[in-house]
Image (cartoon, rainbow, N blue to C red):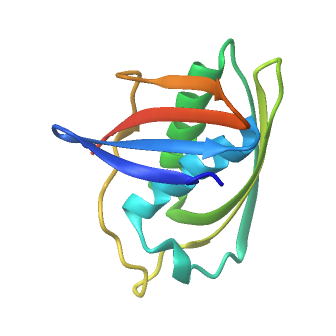
Amino acid sequence: MFLRYKLIQHTADVGIVAQGASMGDAFGFAASGLFSLITDTSTLKQDKIISLEFISDSYENLLVKWLNELIYIFDTQILVFGRFEVAVNSAFKLTAICFGQKVNADTPLHHYVKAATYHLLKVKKITGGYKLQVLLDI
């Protein structure tokens, strides 16, 4: 059984370690970890749905690009997400459907996340799946 994600402290930053049976699952759990820092994702309506697609040159670059795009969407469209359906293929292509809601007066906001960083970034295959580590600048 995978832990899905856990948050780790690192000086002024917060890290996410995510594990999944597939690379897509691990990327989805990393996004869940990101939004758990921002708000209580268990209470979201999930009435806003967006689709995203990215191509990169490595899984590491794809992970940072993915999380930074989610942060950008939060910043510009004021949307928070609680569920993700993510697929990542061996050509470093990610496709995702994100389920969430517009932030309103009842949405608790905890931390402002500035960006996903490359510091201590790891993407690796483990027995039965994949494990990711990424630090977030808060």
Q: Measuring from the top left, give residue 87's x and y in whole percent.
A: 81, 41
Q: Quadrant location of the C terminus?
A: top left
Q: Relative to residue 32, is residue 85 drawn left or right?
A: right
Where is residue 112, by image quadrant? bottom left
Quadrant in the rendering for residue 45: bottom right
Which residue is farthest top?
57
Residue 42 relative to residue 112: left or right: right
In percent of width and height, residue 88 lies at: 78, 33
Front residue of 114/35: it is 35
Q: Of all residues shown, which one is farthest toward the bottom?
A: 106
Q: Does 114 appear above or below 102?
A: above
Residue 93 visible in the picture: yes
Give the quarter of the figure containing the N terminus: bottom right
In the displayed orientation, state which residue is furthest to the left: 11
Q: Can you give x and y, in whole percent of width and height, for residue 128 in the image?
A: 73, 37
> Relative to 83, is 30 on the left or the right?
left
Residue 76 visible to an observer of this rendering:
no
Viewer-side residue, 50 vs 117: 117
Up the image or down, 9 lies above or below 123; here it is: below
Number of callouts? 0
Q: Residue at point 39% right, 28% down?
A: 117
The answer to whether residue 103 is left or right of residue 19 is left
Q: Residue at x 47, y 42 (%)?
A: 17
Which residue is at the front of the view, 81 or 6?
6
Q: Which quadrant would residue 16 be assigned to in this image?
A: top left
Query: What's the residue at 57%, 25% (across, down)?
Result: 123
> Residue 101: percent from the left, percent from the top?
60, 73
Tell me if residue 131 comes above or below residue 1 in the rendering: above
Work out whether residue 41 or residue 6 is closer to the camera in this orientation and state it.
6
From what the image shows, is residue 35 above or below residue 125?
Answer: below
